[in-house]
Structures are given as C-alpha cells and as structure tokens.
Amino acid sequence: MTTLPHGYRTVEVTHARREELLTVDTWAFPGPLSDEQLLALPSPLSWDRTRGVEADDGELVAVHASYPFAGFPVPGARTAVSGLTWVGVHPGHRRRGLLRAMIDEHVRRSLARGEALSALFAAEAPIYGRFGYGLAANDLRLTVPRGAALRDVPGAEDVRVRLERLGPEHDEVLHRVHASVDRPGWATRETPELRAAFMSDPEHGRDGAESLRIALAEHGGEVRGYAIFRRRSHWDVPGPRGVVRVREVVAPGPAVARALWGVLLDLDLMAKVETWLMPVDDPLLHLLVDPRAAEPRVADNVWLRVLDVPRALAARRYSAPVDVVLEVADALVPANAGRWRVAGGPDGAEVLPTDAEPDLRLDVRSLGSAYLGGVTLAALAGAGLVTEVRPGALAAASTAFGWPVAPVCSWVF
C-alpha cells in the first residue's frame, strides 16, 4: 500500500466542493471553457465515489472518482466494474506519489464494493500500464464521403428512420436501446448523473455546428436503434462542403444498420460523415461497397485492470473448453499473484489456486488486455508479454479467451 507523503491527506470530495474539483481538473486538463461555463454543466460524478488529496492548508490538489457499472458486459455475461475517471493532480504537486496513492485507494475501495475489474479511458497511454491496466479494446474512426454506396440489406426498406432534435424526451428510449447491447466493454450510462451529462448540449461545445440531432430507427412500431449526430455547414467555391459528425450509433441487426447509415450518408449540403468510437468489426465496413473510401483509423478505447483474478475470470464465459494454469504476476495486488487453474467453457468456469506447473506465464496487465476477448493471448505472446510453458497451451487458451464480437465502449468515460 502506498502512503501519501508528509503534508497530504486523503479526503472525500462532496458536491459542495465541486468548484475546487473543477479547479484541479482544469489544471490537469486545460480547456477553453470558463469557470462559469463548467459549473453550468451537469456533473456526471457519483459523489459517494469521488475522492481527493488535500494539502495541509486545506487546498484540494488531486482528485479521482469512479462510475458504478453494475452490469458491464464481459464475454457472455455481465459483471460489476469500477469505471475509474476524473483522475488529476495539480501540476504544482506532481512527482510526489499522489497518483500512485490514489490508484491504491481506488483499488482498495473497488474491491471492498465487490468490483473485480476496473476500466478506464486513458488520457495518456503510458501512465496506466504501470498500474496493471491493459489495453483491452480498440475503436474505429471513419471519414466517409457523402453518397458512398452501400450494399442492399433485406428488410431495410421496412425500417422507418425518423429525424428529430435531441431532447430530454429521448432519454428513456436511448437508455433502453443502449443497455440492450451485449458487446463486451459496452458500458451503459447507469446513473441519472451520467445520463444527464450525456444529454447535455451547450452551445459553446458545438464548435460552430448545430445542436444535436437524433435518427430513430423504428420497426413494428418500436424504436430498435438510433444515431446521434450534428451537422456543421461549410461552403467552398465548388459549393456546400458540410460535415456530419456522428456521436453514437446503436444499430442491432443489419436492416437497422443499413437504414440508419443510408440516411446519415445522404444528408443534403454535406460532403462527408465523420464517425468515432465504433467497434473495429462494425457492420458499416461491410456495408460500404468501397471501404477504402472511408479512410479507417484505429485508436485505443477501453483499458482494463483485473483487481480480483479468480472472481474476474469466473465472471466471464469462454468460447471453447478451457483447462489452463496461469501464473500471474501482480505487484500492486499481491493476492492476485500466483498460479490459477481456469477450467470451464461456454457455460462458465471455475478458477482455483493451484500448485501445479503453469501452462502460461503473464502479468496482470496482459491478463486485462485479453479479458474482453478482443486481444488474443497469442498476439500478446508474439510481443513477449505471455510465455508458453506447456507446448500447445497457448493456442487452446487463446481460442477460449477470444470472443466472436470485438469489444468497444461507445462513449468516453
């Protein structure tokens, strides 16, 4: 356990100290908004999960928080995950071990709540690997020219797409449709605070674009999918060159996906459509007649930290029968270090400590990378991050830990 240096103490951060928290946050993450504009935004935080570090003079100098994801999708199941967020240290107090102490506290508090996993989006990729977080999901970002040809999909013509200005009246249907997705990593905005913050659309955050719009895909009288987007007008000598910026798409089923993208790619006065935070296996790549025209780019998405190895590995399902002994190294959580036998398959697995010889050796960071099924153990072994001890164990375990759909989270937390 890391202790704070002399002159600092850990404190609860309540809503009454929100202005102080925002001061620390803006020192850690500079931005264009004024203090008044920031205070006017709805806070996404759960205040009972918000903590900080205070100097002897009472100044708040570091903060961190977590979101409660009680039903976080993992391969074949859902489990409780602690979403680490709002981590920041005032630049006048860096290099003193405050971040490490806050991570230690986050781990302890998460485990006490029964959360065997922690997830985050990393502002700087190198930081969180030091604390055992592994990159578990990537996302796809596309720039698609307007009018790009799409393949036909049977039933798409029966899906009605209704365009409206996004408003509070859409909150319930957004939550229902979003929460119905079982893709690993697909965190749902479970708290009222997160839902309100996601729906917020202040004018100063639009970068010259319009207010948010929503495309509702209906079939059989029920909303089955949606896309949230905004348009930014631009005119050049040849004519209109506007941009459609797609914030989130939820499209269960090929007909819904074809109907939504058919509308988004055919909006008047637009020249291109920009998307982000899409799964790397998104249907749009296969709907496009010319996928090269979409200029695909891949970026890191969810990072995952296994806090309780046996509980976390027992919480997910496996694509094939598995019986493997993992030797795990974990400097931050000693209870995770050791050998664990994982035996099971598509219906679940039992995970127990063992003295048997290991089949694979890896650290907890690599285990986090492989956990959601999007990064294979074989790929990690190719980088020297997993060691095969028993010949043949790597291929079998890599297959079992994999999953048919790529993990992703559709929003940044």
Image: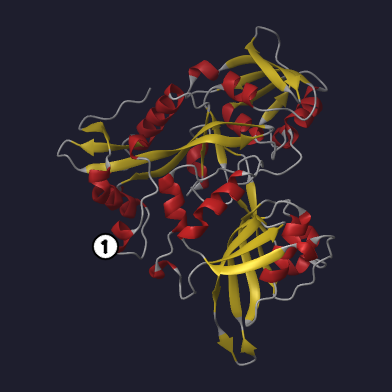
Q: Quadrant of residue 99?
A: top left
Nearest the eye: 331 or 304: 304
Does 277 sit left or right of 349 as displayed? left
Whether residue 334 is situated above or below residue 154 in the rendered picture: above
What's the residue at 77%, 58% (across, down)?
Answer: 255
Whether residue 184 is situated above or below residue 350 in the rendered picture: below
**SS class, disc 1:** helix
Residue 384 location (% of width, % of height):
68, 33
Q: Is residue 284 visible?
A: no
Residue 280 location (% of width, % of height):
70, 51
Residue marked by disc 1: 36
Does 402 sit left or right of 190 as displayed? right
Q: Quadrant of residue 137?
A: top right
Q: Is residue 370 visible?
A: yes
Nearest the eye: 83 or 394: 83
Give the amino acid at mark 1: Glu
